[in-house]
Amino acid sequence: QVELVESGGGSVQAGGSLRLSCVASGFAQSRMMGWFRQAPGKERAGVAAIYTGGDDAHYADSVKGRFTISRGNAKNTIYLQMNSLKPEDSAMYYCAASARTYVTRFWYNQADYNTWGQGTQVTVSS
């Protein structure tokens, strides 16, 4: 059974940084993994995705140049380095894993992800 555990959320002031981690258990094959976020009253949306067997990464326009998704050497860990945080980045952040063994151009399609973590809260104050 695949399980995802996120960590690293917290509260920061605007302009600050946070690093989220997601550790997956229950699989060893490289696959597409991603970060999504959901703010109160809004739909969950894709933030970034990466193929854990390489460096192919994609980002939402709203975070390009500020966020960086990366993978660990063990292929079951991904990170999200968030810099220059803005109040509008405040949300619950979820890690997700897909059965796909590559990153698709529609990486933000939540139906492609079959395993989700519990989420970690990020709050950015102005």
Image (tube, helix red, strand yellow):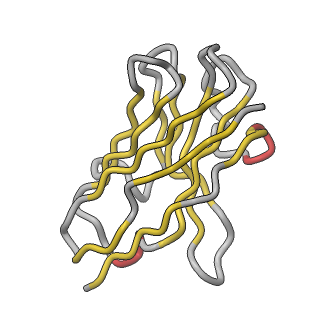
Asked if residue 74 is positioned above or below residue 64 in the image, the reply reads: above
Q: Is residue 1 left or right of residue 52?
A: right
Residue 124 at x, y = what percent? 33, 76
Residue 23 at x, y = what percent? 51, 36
Q: Residue at x 50, y 71 (%)?
A: 91
Asked if residue 101 is positioned above or below residue 34 in the image, the reply reads: above
**The C terminus sits in image quarter:** bottom left
Asked if residue 12 is positioned above or below residue 65 in the image, the reply reads: below
Q: Residue at x 42, y 69 (%)?
A: 122
Q: Residue at x 65, y 83 (%)?
A: 41
Residue 84 at x, y = what percent? 22, 62
Q: Is residue 3 left or right of residue 65?
A: right
Q: Tell me which corner region of the image, top left, top right, bottom left or bottom right, holds residue 25.
A: top right
Of all residues shown, which one is farthest toward the left? 15
Count of marks placed on residues: 0
Asked if residue 71 is positioned above or below residue 121 in the image, the reply reads: above
Residue 92 at x, y = what percent? 54, 67
**The N terminus sits in image quarter:** top right
